[in-house]
Structures are given as structure tokens and as C-alpha cells.
């Protein structure tokens, strides 16, 4: 096979985590619903965030999805997308990262989030809730973060979606910690 055949910007919606490989979007939603049904009287945070890493000949993007039950664990998975070139523009990388997070967030709009809320609704008076975030891998400190020039633009894009609140560093855990961890190795065929 030629190297150019191995990498595509838009792959199928396949997700992975530490215990499972090749999960479909429906699998992901079912795992999340199962996680909520184990303790439907708790508050939950749905976090989606993307990070990227430039490797030789390609840029690897990883979008993390985390369903967190504060103080009581989390369920998480990630999706990998590879662009067959080395990105050098900070704005281009941040724009693509935000777009990939928004893409996944759109899949949760409607039916998936409604199903989560239906499980939680009978327990609202016991503390059940669902907050939804898109975590942007950008910081607001110009001295520390090259991305600070573009933070407001990315936040505005996320907030225009309606359902999701935007978070940036140091609060953008799904992007700057979880997804970041999976960007370090160059992309490979084996997943």
C-alpha cells in the first residue's frame, strides 16, 4: 500500500478506549446510556474536545468524548482522524480541532442527548443533571499560549451551537488532557 492511501481527513465514525476498539457511534451512545443508568440520580458532564499533534508527513487529530459523573468516575472514548500533511499554522490546527469537536457534538444533538436526559429526568430532585461542554485546546494567556489570539473566535463558534458551553485551558480537560494523551504516537494502520 502507498502511504497516501493510509491517511484520510474524514474517516468513518470509529471510536476506541482502553478496553474496546472499533466502536460505532451507536455503540458509544449505548455505553453512555448504560453508564448513566447505573446511577441516574447523579450530575453528569458530557465533554467533547480535540487535540492534534504534527508528526512526520501527517497531523494526527484525536477527539475525546468523556461522560463524567463528578466524584464517581467517567466513561470515555476517542476518535482519530489523520490529515496527510504537516500543519504549521496554529490557527488552522485550532480551527480544525474545533470543527472536529463540533462535528461529534452535532451527532449527540437531538436523540442521543434526549435519551440521556430521559434517564435523568425522574431524578432531577435527587441531583440528576446533564451539562454539555466542548473543550477547546486553547489558552487565554498570550505569553504562554500561541492560541490566545483565536480563543474568542472558537468560543463564539461553539456558543453559536446553543447546547454546548465552551471551555478553554486550564478547564478544557477533554482536549488538553484526554485527547492530548492519544496524539503523541504517529498514526498507524493498526487500531
Image (cartoon, rainbow, N blue to C red):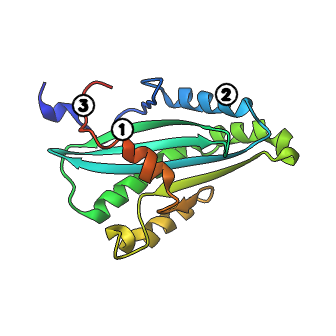
Earlier in the chain: of badge 3 and badge 2, it is: 2
Q: Which mark is residue 188?
A: 3
The location of residue 138, given as percent across then percent down, is 41, 63
Identify which residue is drawn at 44% across, 37% down. 78
Between the C-alphas of marks 2 and 1, the distance is 24 Å
Element at label 3: loop
Identify which residue is drawn at 42% across, 24% down. 22
| Crowd tier of the residue under label 1, counting other residues whose Cα lies within 10 Å: few below 14, some 14–19, many 20 or above | many
Between 163 and 18, the residue placed more toward the observer is: 18
Q: Is the residue 113 above or below the residue 12 in the image? A: below
Identify which residue is drawn at 59% across, 32% down. 29
Label pair 2/1, CB-CB below 8 angstroms:
no
**Dot 2 corresponds to which residue?**
34
For the N terminus, the quadrant is top left
Between 118 and 133, the residue placed more toward the observer is: 133
The location of residue 187, given as percent across then percent down, is 25, 36
**Residue 49 visible (yes or no):** no
- Picture quadrant of residue 190: top left
**Dot 1 corresponds to which residue?**
80
Element at label 1: strand
- Looking at the rendered structure, the number of numbered marks drawn on it comes to 3
Amino acid at each position: 500500500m502507498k502511504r497516501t492511501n493510509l491517511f484520510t481527513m474524514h474517516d468513518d465514525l470509529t471510536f476506541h478506549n482502553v478496553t474496546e476498539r472499533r466502536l460505532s457511534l451507536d455503540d458509544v451512545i449505548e455505553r453512555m446510556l448504560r453508564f448513566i443508568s447505573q446511577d441516574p440520580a447523579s450530575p453528569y458532564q458530557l465533554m467533547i474536545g480535540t487535540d492534534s499533534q504534527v508528526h512526520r508527513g501527517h497531523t494526527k487529530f484525536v477527539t475525546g468524548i468523556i461522560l463524567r459523573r463528578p466524584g464517581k468516575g467517567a466513561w470515555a472514548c476517542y476518535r482519530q482522524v489523520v490529515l496527510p500533511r504537516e500543519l504549521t499554522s496554529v490557527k488552522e490546527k485550532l480551527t480544525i480541532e474545533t470543527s472536529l469537536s463540533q462535528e461529534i457534538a452535532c451527532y449527540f444533538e437531538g436523540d442521543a442527548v434526549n435519551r440521556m436526559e430521559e434517564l435523568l429526568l425522574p431524578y432531577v430532585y435527587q441531583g440528576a443533571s446533564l451539562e454539555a461542554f466542548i473543550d477547546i485546546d486553547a489558552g487565554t494567556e498570550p505569553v504562554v499560549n500561541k492560541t490566545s489570539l483565536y480563543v474568542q473566535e472558537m468560543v463564539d463558534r461553539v456558543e453559536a451551537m446553543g447546547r454546548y458551553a465552551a471551555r478553554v485551558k486550564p478547564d478544557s480537560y477533554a482536549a488538553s488532557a484526554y485527547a492530548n494523551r492519544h496524539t503523541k504516537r504517529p498514526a498507524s494502520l493498526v487500531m
